[in-house]
């Protein structure tokens, strides 16, 4: 079964397999290996962003569709959970209904955008999706009676997933609380969604998508309906992004325009795809892990480095934690220069 799953979509390099295993084991064991809430927050964010970035790679890397509306579907999933729990309470049925509603709305919007836009050239499709994303973000901000506006919404979740829920169970010296259960809900859901996407890209459907990406005219000539395949890929990508948004809402217990619909988030997704490598899915694993870790800990590392070099001229100023975005930009430029096909692409080429 595993051989069938990874056929044509496996890591393809021993070093890449090792890195993927490190990420998997790190995420799987975070509550028991790393102390404090920050490590678990970072690990949960990595797991969610792996799914979100991989779903975008399914669209960009495998189908060749450039979209700037992917955060809209992520936001629909999050707001679906928020609205359902606000009206129906904090039960599991509300979570399920909100998630389903967010997925359905995302698929409907993706289908509409695809049917109206996928027949135009790539740059015009990208501009249309950018306009849709901007319009949705403005709409969500203005409908404060429904969405909470700029202030966002707090989310009610089952008590079993909150820090207040405690059990007598202890594993490796760590008490199993609702926060730990919430983390593993996110982790296993993200893992299952990633395996689903691997299965999709290794299937005949996934190979047709890659053929369309390489030469849509030839794919059309040999009998494949390019618009249909692109529409299905767009809807599938939107559904998975909505599920990632629902997981994000359940974990964060808050949703707002800045956390789910911002242009900055769309740029972050693009950066993670480019850093990891387009058209691989495994690039989402490494790209998300590296980017989120840098976001979470680069300032801390820079503060320590600035303190260690305090006696030297100029260097402490350059390593000032307030300049972490500058160093993030430099790291991105270096990654593009040395890994033009992404980390995964470079590792596969060097195997």
Image (spheres, helix red, strand yellow):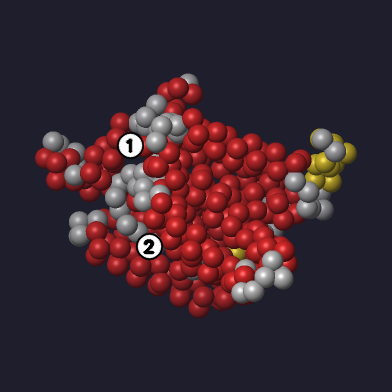
Name the side, left or right, on which 79 lies relative to 132.
right
Q: Are marks 1 and 2 in contact (CB under 8 Å)?
A: no
Residue at horizontal 33 percent and vertical 54 percent from the top: 111
**Circle 1 residue:** 206
- Residue 122, given in percent of the width and then of the height, sits at 24, 59
Residue at horizontal 38 percent and vertical 62 percent from the top: 68
Residue at horizontal 51 percent and vertical 45 percent from the top: 286
- Residue 15, given in percent of the width and then of the height, sits at 50, 34
Q: Secondary structure at mark 1?
A: helix
The answer for how far apart the CA atoms under marks 1 and 2 are is 22 Å
Q: Secondary structure at mark 2?
A: loop
- Dot 1, how many residues are within 10 Å of its Cα: few (below 14), some (14-19), or many (20+)? many
Work out which residue is located at the far front of the displayed protein and give it: 312
Q: Is residue 253 above or below residue 100?
A: below
Work out which residue is located at the far bottom of the displayed protein and give it: 142
The quarter of the picture where the C terminus appears is: top left
Work out which residue is located at the far left of the displayed protein and give it: 221
Residue at horizontal 22 percent and vertical 48 percent from the top: 227
- The answer to which of 139 and 229 lies nearer the viewer is 229
Q: Is residue 218 visible?
A: yes
**Circle 2 residue:** 68
Q: Is residue 54 visible?
A: no
């Amino acid at each position: 079964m595993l051989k069938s799953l990874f056929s044509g979509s496996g890591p393809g390099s021993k070093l890449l397999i090792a890195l993927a295993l490190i990420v998997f084991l790190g995420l799987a064991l975070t509550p028991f290996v790393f102390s404090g809430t920050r490590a678990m927050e970072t690990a949960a964010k990595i797991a969610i962003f792996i799914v979100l970035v991989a779903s975008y790679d399914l669209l960009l890397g495998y189908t060749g569709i450039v979209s700037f509306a992917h955060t809209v579907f992520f936001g629909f999933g999050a707001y679906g959970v928020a609205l359902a729990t606000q009206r129906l309470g904090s039960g599991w049925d509300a979570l399920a209904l909100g998630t389903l509603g967010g997925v359905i709305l995302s698929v409907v919007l993706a289908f509409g955008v695809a049917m109206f836009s996928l027949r135009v050239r790539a740059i015009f499709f990208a501009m249309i999706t950018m306009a849709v994303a901007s319009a949705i973000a403005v709409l969500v901000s203005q409908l404060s009676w429904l969405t909470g506006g700029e202030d966002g919404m707090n989310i009610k979740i089952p008590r079993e997933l909150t820090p207040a829920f405690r059990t007598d169970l202890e594993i490796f010296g760590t008490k199993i609380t609702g926060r730990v259960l919430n983390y593993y809900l996110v982790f296993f859901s993200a893992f299952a969604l990633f395996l689903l996407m691997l299965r999709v890209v290794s299937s005949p459907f996934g190979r047709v998508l890659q053929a369309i990406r390489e030469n849509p005219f030839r794919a059309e000539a040999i009998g494949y309906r390019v618009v249909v395949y692109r529409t299905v890929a767009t809807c599938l990508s939107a559904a998975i992004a909505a599920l990632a948004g629902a997981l994000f809402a359940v974990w964060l217990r808050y949703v707002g325009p800045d956390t789910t619909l911002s242009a900055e988030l769309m740029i972050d997704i693009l950066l993670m795809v480019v850093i990891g490598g387009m058209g691989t899915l495994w690039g989402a694993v490494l790209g998300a892990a590296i980017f989120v870790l840098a976001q979470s800990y680069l300032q801390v590392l820079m503060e320590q480095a600035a303190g260690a070099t305090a006696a030297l001229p100029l260097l402490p100023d350059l390593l000032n934690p307030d300049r972490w975005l500058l160093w993030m930009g430099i790291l991105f430029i270096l990654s593009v220069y040395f890994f033009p096909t992404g980390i995964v692409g470079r590792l596969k080429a060097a195997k």
